[in-house]
Amino acid sequence: MAFDAYVKREFKQVGTRVARPDGVDKVTGRALYGADMVAPGMLVGRVLRSPHAHARIVSIDTSEAAAMPGVKGIVTGRDFSVPKDEFLADVAVNCLAQDKALYDGHAIAAVAAINATVARDALKKIKVEYEVLPHVTDIDVAAKPDAPVVLEGRALETVPAGMGANVTHRCEFGHGDLEAGFAKADKIVERSFRTAATHQGYIEPHACLASFTTDGRADLWVCTQGHFYFRTLCSEMLGMEASQLKVTASEIGGGFGGKTTVYLEPVALMLSKKTGRPVKMVMTRDEVFRATGPTVSTSIDVKIGMTKDGRITAGWADMRYSGGAFQCLTCEMGAQAAFAAYDLEAVQTVGWNVMTNRPKEAAYRAPGAPQAIYAVESVVDELCQGLGLDPLEVRIKNAAKKGTKASYGPTFDDIGLLATLEAAKKHPHYTAPLAEGQARGLSCGFWFNFGGNTCVTMNVNTDGTVGIAEGNPDIGGSRASISLMAAEELGIPYEKVRTIIADTASLGYADTTDGSRVTFAVGIATINAARDAIRKMCKRAAMLWGIDEDAVEWKDGAAHPAGPNAGKFPPMSLADIAAKSFQTGGPIAGHYEVNADGAGVSFGVHLCDVEVDKETGATKVVRYTVFQDAGKAVHPDYVEGQMQGGAAQGIGWALNEEYIYGADGRLQNPGFLDYRIPVASDLPPIEAVILEIPNPGHPYGVRGVGETSIVPPLAAISNAISRSIGTRLQELPMSPPRVLKAIKGAA
Amino acid sequence: MSVTVSTTVNGDSVDFVCAPDETLLDALRGRLGLTGAKEGCGTGDCGACSVTLNGRLVCSCLVLAVEAEGQEIATVEGMAAGETLHPLQRAFIDHAALQCGICTPGILVAAKALLEKTPDPSDEEVRYWLAGNLCRCTGYDKIVRAVQAAAAEMRRA
């Protein structure tokens, strides 16, 4: 089934703010995260990492380390065969280097020992001979033909001849006649922007516990956004069948896209296989920054033409993205998202990937979109300033709507952008007077959203309660939302439903918790599993009543005889039917599996007021409002939470956060002191205004909400700062020294 | 070399043996099985390991386990009284003040320490007090509201 149509209905439970089922465990310290698990006889694993940005590994001598008391096993890249599939090979090489160290922090070898102290000491005894190679960490330098080459022969056929060897992909989107479009414009602005790489910044470092047995089976406990995908990656790298590897997702201490791929896990499994003992591995924060995450760094040119009355006549962008030392296709997301908020006759975007000696890019909330939309929304704002137009009116005038041919190809169905813009216009924030020294900025944001593979089993227990097994780690309250949808469909109280995240041996495949897909896709599967269970319960009721099963209907949590000829029977509740299930054919369970389509794109608009300290260049965000289309907010608290959390991350990206590399190619700020994410005193209250424009592709109208919210803050804050200091910054983050420099430059 | 440490954790007398360079956080988690305090950074920047030492809020990753000798430690595991949650714990659930929950134990311990000193804090006081506790999920908005709701409830009690 490709498309599960929305049917308008009155909700009884969906939309209420119930207590989340994992709440008590999480406020009492009982919840078990990646690093909280132990196993008898457990060893501790530690990773040796490259101190060089780029170096050939001439030799690795592990003999002295291996001879140390308490050291039980050592692995290097040579213990793994590199998979033939290029994408999988990159993941494997990122877990343990083969012939070259490709960035500062690249894993070279790993040790398993009786405790962390012995493991740490053993790393110092591993002798690695490096031949240091020239490196490049800056995207614009890396794109040049004479730049040091990160990896040879990685360019796809999409790259035209004559480009530097680090340029590995080119993509293009758009439609219409650009030249004619620009000819119609009264004003054209063309600008270049750069954005720093940022880290997802989850507070829980990567952690896992692997246990390999001598009969070739293995268990893996891990904090992950996708334990089924981890099983795929690990089993391929270990050369084992997927069925022999059971992966259990721990509670996850934040992911934001960064826990969608493996780092430690294959290494821990291999160490466990070699030593015959369980091996636990936990990253330090330094390792998290140097070797996991970050986003792409970018360099983007944008050109937009506008008429005097604010109609955009043409838009063009050329965007270079660097996904670190490997091939990376995130530039496609950026090139598709850049102009998605606009209904344009002529638009063209070109995306490029450029390799640098930086860690392998990992997804971060709407990967690729914040940077692209920051550049576009900055130029739109500058045009509004230049033409003396209201920036919100201009966006309303040009907004994409139902029937708009999107800049990236498809034609939009029902979308919420206009409603979101109108809500921002009506909100008191938009017209509130600004205090002396304050300025206001706004930006649109967009994300595609995703559906994907999902499997749900719903067990009707004999006591009238319901257990749901689903396969997606809960990163923001999804167990509550899934339980709510099940309760709604079944017509039983929320408290009667318990949702658990099943391990990979207990349920069919589930795609990773990403793409804002869980409430949408697992919701579809849950609602349909409930409908499956209802059909079966109606059949049991029909059997007990001795009537035809078509003569039974389900409403308010009970089977009812339907129609004049069904006979008169009192309703039979879910609990009644469940209690008699052993006499009517056995246990009752609903099941559903789907590769869900129709996720429905999501738009948001952010408004912010800032105050810039003209002496220090520090920016304070004094008011912030998020408007976003949720389709249907199943649990409004956690929808608001996504909107607020994404905004806070975007504010950090705009103002503070950046990967800073030294001339030696080493990361200079691998810790929370120097990579400063927003703290409570940095932020104002963040008001979240939920719009509900039902998604036609979900039975309850749900759209994903998790990612769009990180997209608008970058430009919203930049636009506010430019109005505050009278000049526009074209580089992120807008840290105090940069803002101060801009103020002095303008004076 | 190992050291025996006798201390009090959440009102219980406990002894453990540790290395002299072991952190209090590692001893709590590894020796005593109290995994409520989390290690987010190991450098005192994130506050996920917050506990109190004789009533004073500390990052347990910056305290040596041997320093706990003869002292009183309180962790998140000691906040609830049996089945009754502390008002802060209840408020965090009711106000959806957690998403992933990894920072929650540290923030609860820190907020409890705040309300013991300052029963009626302003929002700004809450935000500055919690500035040492990083949360990456919520944007802090619902956390501040939950702390204020709990403070109001505790003032009424």
Image (cartoon, coloured by chain):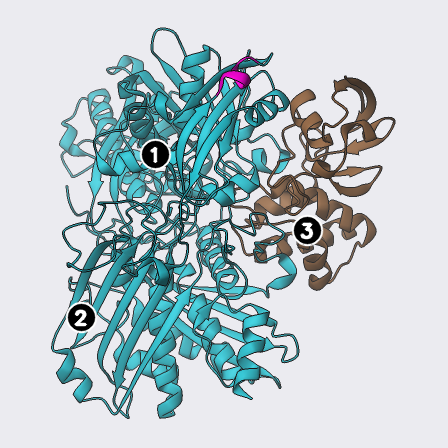
Q: The brown chain is which one?
A: B
Q: Label the magenta part by its dominant secondary structure.
A: helix
Specify start and end residues of the magenta stretch as a single range.
Answer: A62-67
Q: Mark 2 lies on which chain?
A: A
- Pick whichever, A609 or A48, lies toward us: A48
Helix, strand or loop at mark 1: helix
- Is residue A159 shown above or below A589? below
Residue A462 lies, in percent from the top left, at: 38, 20
Residue A738 in sight: yes
Residue A77 lies, in percent from the top left, at: 37, 27
Residue named by callout 2: A404
- Pick whichever, A632 or A491, lies toward us: A632
Instruction: Tell me whether the residue at label 1 lies in contact with that at label 2, contact meaning CB atoms closer than 8 angstroms.
Output: no
Residue A76 is marked as none
Residue named by callout 1: A93
Label 2: few (<14), some (14–19) or many (≥20) C-alpha neighbours in 10 Å? many
Residue named by callout 3: B132
Q: Distance between the residues labelled 3 and 2?
A: 47 Å
Horizontal relation, residue A656 to residue B46: left or right: left
Is residue A63 part of the magenta span, yes or no?
A: yes
Is residue A583 part of the magenta span, yes or no?
A: no
> Disc 2 residue type?
Thr
- Is residue B108 shown above or below A741? above
Between discs 1 and 2, the one toward the N terminus = 1
- Is residue A206 shown above or below A322? above
> Disc 1 residue type?
Val
Q: Quadrant of the rendered structure where residue A231 is?
A: top left
> Disc 3 residue type?
Gly
Q: Nearer the viewer, mark 1 or mark 2?
A: 1
